[in-house]
Image (cartoon, rainbow, N blue to C red):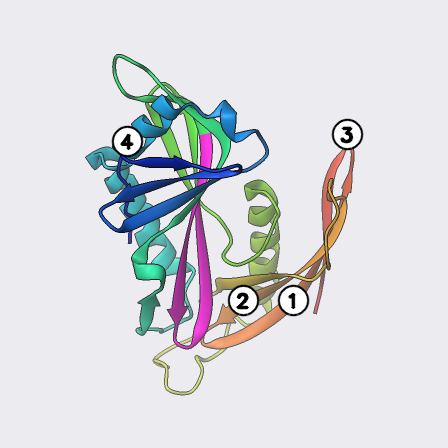
């Protein structure tokens, strides 16, 4: 499920660059900064790093967690789209040590598209360089949510507290294993409800799709940011 990436040739565009091997190419988008800030040398090193065993192992662990926790309950039919290739969005220039080849700084997101039991599934993994050679993989909410990781986590655990409390004795949906009470809760999709969101984004609405033992429950989340204070959210049915 890793994106196919190589170091040459690199084709730069106004907003991104393509990394190609044979006839397979992966388009890299630069977000929030000028593409010229990402050097060609570091972009080549980035391709080599993604081919390393360390990155592949970390990416695989994050992918396994995603398949276990962010797909519909009981779903066994999962199809990877786009030939299994991930799109990459670099949000902070990725820089590498010339001697060790290890990443020193940078952030990027890798997005992979699936169809899971007839539903769309857009999965995101954020990678953040915390220090020399120290990269962390962060599973983000699937779909279109623009909330940051900490805000997504707070919304998820608030929903979980409500749902598990209300449905502790809920049985799985028809056709699922019903040997006992089901307390499964999986966030399987998010939608942006605010049309043409402005920048900076201070108020917006999202719809979160939560799978409760095979039954999908949708909740509307209203977010509001106060500069210098933080972002609050309100959950509506």
- Name the magenta segment's main secondary structure: strand
Q: Position of residue 64 (x, y in %)?
A: 30, 53
Image-based side of 225 in relation to 8, left or right: right
- The one of 129 and 171 positioned closer to us in this rendering: 129
Name the quadrant of the N terminus: bottom left
Q: Are marks 1 and 2 in contact (CB under 8 Å)?
A: yes
Residue hosting label 1: 219
Crowding around mark 4 (Cα neighbors within 10 Å: few <14, some 14 to 19, many 20+) is some
The question of residue 115 being in magenta is answered with yes
Q: Which mark is residue 228?
A: 3
- The one of 66 and 183 positioned closer to us in this rendering: 66
Residue hosting label 2: 210
Q: CA distance from mark 3 to mark 2?
A: 31 Å
Q: Position of residue 17 (x, y in %)?
A: 42, 38
* Residue range highlighted in magenta: 107-125
Nearer the camera: disc 3 or disc 4? 4
- Residue at the image position 69 percent from the left and 62 percent from the top: 193
Crowding around mark 2 (Cα neighbors within 10 Å: few <14, some 14 to 19, many 20+) is many
Is tag 1's residue or tag 2's residue first in the polypeptide sequence? 2
Is tag 3's residue or tag 4's residue first in the polypeptide sequence? 4
Q: CA distance from mark 1 to mark 3?
A: 28 Å
Q: Which mark is residue 49?
A: 4
Q: Are marks 3 and 2 in contact (CB under 8 Å)?
A: no
Q: Position of residue 16 (x, y in %)?
A: 47, 38
Q: CA distance from mark 3 to mark 4?
A: 37 Å
Residue furthest out toward the right = 226
Is tag 1's residue or tag 4's residue first in the polypeptide sequence? 4
């Amino acid at each position: 499920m890793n994106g196919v990436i190589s170091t040459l040739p690199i084709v730069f565009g106004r907003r991104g660059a393509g990394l190609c091997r044979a006839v397979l190419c992966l388009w890299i988008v630069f977000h929030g900064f000028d593409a010229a800030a990402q050097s060609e040398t570091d972009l080549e090193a980035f391709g080599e790093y993604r081919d390393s065993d360390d990155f592949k192992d970390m990416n695989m662990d994050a992918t396994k967690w995603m398949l276990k926790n962010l797909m519909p309950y009981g779903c066994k039919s999962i199809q990877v789209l786009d030939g299994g290739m991930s799109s990459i969005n670099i949000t902070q220039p990725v820089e590498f040590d010339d001697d060790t080849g290890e990443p020193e700084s940078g952030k990027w997101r890798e997005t992979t598209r699936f169809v899971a039991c007839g539903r769309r599934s857009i999965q995101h993994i954020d990678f953040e360089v915390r220090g020399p050679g120290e990269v962390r993989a962060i599973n983000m909410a699937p779909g279109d949510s623009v909330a940051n990781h900490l805000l997504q986590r707070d919304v998820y655990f608030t929903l979980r507290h409500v749902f598990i409390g209300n449905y502790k004795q809920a049985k799985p949906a028809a056709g699922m294993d019903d040997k006992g009470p089901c307390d499964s809760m999986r966030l399987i999709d998010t939608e942006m409800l605010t049309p043409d969101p402005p920048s900076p984004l201070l108020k917006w609405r999202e719809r979160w799709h939560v799978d409760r033992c095979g039954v999908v429950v949708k909740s509307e989340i209203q977010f509001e940011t106060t500069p210098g204070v933080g972002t609050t959210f309100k959950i509506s049915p």
